[in-house]
Image (cartoon, grey):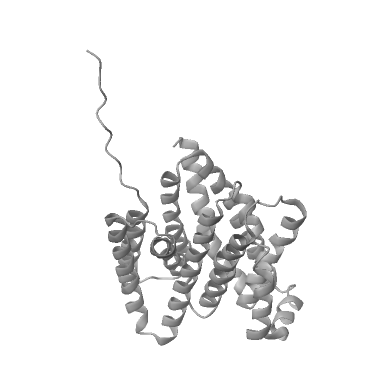
């Protein structure tokens, strides 16, 4: 992998890690599910007008949109709105990787290797340690569970991506944004009510509202368009197994930025558990190196 691409991969991890701070700012103004609907609606309109159809089956696009889009961000935004620390959310969401391996084995009959099982066991151990830490606070345990559900939804979305096999992953990702707005708007009407939606829009001129608009702009333009665009380019130019481990830098950036900018102070147990989770996800994502057959040399 060229040095330029390594630097770009690190840049994407930084952009995505800071994305959680932007979500934190957005949730300071908008109800969580309504914020998720807006996040996708802003992308959906120009996508329909200007982005070519990704040439995949509609059911796969719907599956990706409902899993990766609707489920993941509804659960994640509600979790963060109800007390999930920003940095910790960026870490726990990495559970999508072992979830994807397990779901792939169940639904796609993919083989799970011993080192993948070991990685999953490590990641689960780290998650259990974090959950145990949070269990002393009844209010904090629910956001943890919601974040895990967000990771599980992401994993279901990954299965749809694998079945879709899009020719242009970026077009597929952008068209996925067309799916979540309507169900998330409907869910927001039921859970949060039109009064909360209207109040969040009517007070956009306040300092909190302007900060939220900045956060929403970052999530849409930087986190989605720039980040996903660069990541798709890297995945085209390099083997997936070489690029994907760089995503493990996302929670490192998220935890560090939350510590510096938001004053979040993780306990030493959470720091140790975070390292175990990242190690487990890395172990589960690496492919075993096949031994090369000795070459015959003419004498």
Residue ranking furthest to the left: 299
> Residue 262: image x %, image y %?
50, 69
Q: Report the residue at 62% width, 57% height from top.
A: 57
Nearer the observer, 211 or 114:
114
Q: Report the residue at 47% width, 68% height from top.
A: 151
Query: For residue 66, which quarter of the picture?
Result: bottom right
Image-based side of 21 in relation to 206, left or right:
left
Image-based side of 290 in relation to 265, left or right:
left
Q: Is residue 129 visible?
A: yes
Nearer the observer, 49 or 78:
49
Image-based side of 208 in relation to 132, left or right:
right
Q: Report the residue at 28% width, 34% height from top.
A: 292
> Residue 34: image x %, image y %?
66, 75
Identify whether 50 is placed above or below 276. above
Q: Is residue 29 visible?
A: no
Nearer the observer, 197 or 158:
158
Quadrant of the frame with the C terminus: top left
> Residue 265: image x %, image y %?
40, 71
Count of numbered circles on the image: 0
Nearer the observer, 126 or 292:
292
Residue ranking furthest to the top: 299
> Residue 117: image x %, image y %?
30, 60
Quadrant of the frame with the N terminus: top left
Q: Report the residue at 60% width, 46% height from top.
A: 167
């Amino acid at each position: 992998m060229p040095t330029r691409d390594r630097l770009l991969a690190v840049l994407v991890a930084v952009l995505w890690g800071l994305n959680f701070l932007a979500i934190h700012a957005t949730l300071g103004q908008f109800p969580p599910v309504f914020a998720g609907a807006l996040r996708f609606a802003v992308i959906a309109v120009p996508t329909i007008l200007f982005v070519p159809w990704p040439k995949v089956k509609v059911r796969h696009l719907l599956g990706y949109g409902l899993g990766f889009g609707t489920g993941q961000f509804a659960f994640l935004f509600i979790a963060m709105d109800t007390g999930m620390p920003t940095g910790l959310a960026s870490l726990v969401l990495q559970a999508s990787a072992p979830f994807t391996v397990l779901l792939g084995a169940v639904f796609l009959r993919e083989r799970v290797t011993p080192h993948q099982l070991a990685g999953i066991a490590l990641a689960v151990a780290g998650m259990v340690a974090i959950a145990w830490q949070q269990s002393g606070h009844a209010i904090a345990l629910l956001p943890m569970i919601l974040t895990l559900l967000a990771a599980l939804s992401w994993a279901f979305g990954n299965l749809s991506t694998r079945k879709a096999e899009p020719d242009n992953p970026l077009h597929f990702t952008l068209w996925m944004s067309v799916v979540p707005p309507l169900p998330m708007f409907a869910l927001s009407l039921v859970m949060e009510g039109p009064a909360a939606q209207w109040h969040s829009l009517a007070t956009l001129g306040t300092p909190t509202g302007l900060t939220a608009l900045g956060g929403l702009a970052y999530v849409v333009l930087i986190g989605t368009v720039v980040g996903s665009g660069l990541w798709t380019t890297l995945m085209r130019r390099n083997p997936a197994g070489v690029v994907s481990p760089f995503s493990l830098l996302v929670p490192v950036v998220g935890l560090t930025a939350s510590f510096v900018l938001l004053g979040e102070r993780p306990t030493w147990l959470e720091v140790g558990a975070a390292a175990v989770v990242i190690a487990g996800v890395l172990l589960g994502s690496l492919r075993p190196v096949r031994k090369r057959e000795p070459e015959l040399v003419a004498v």
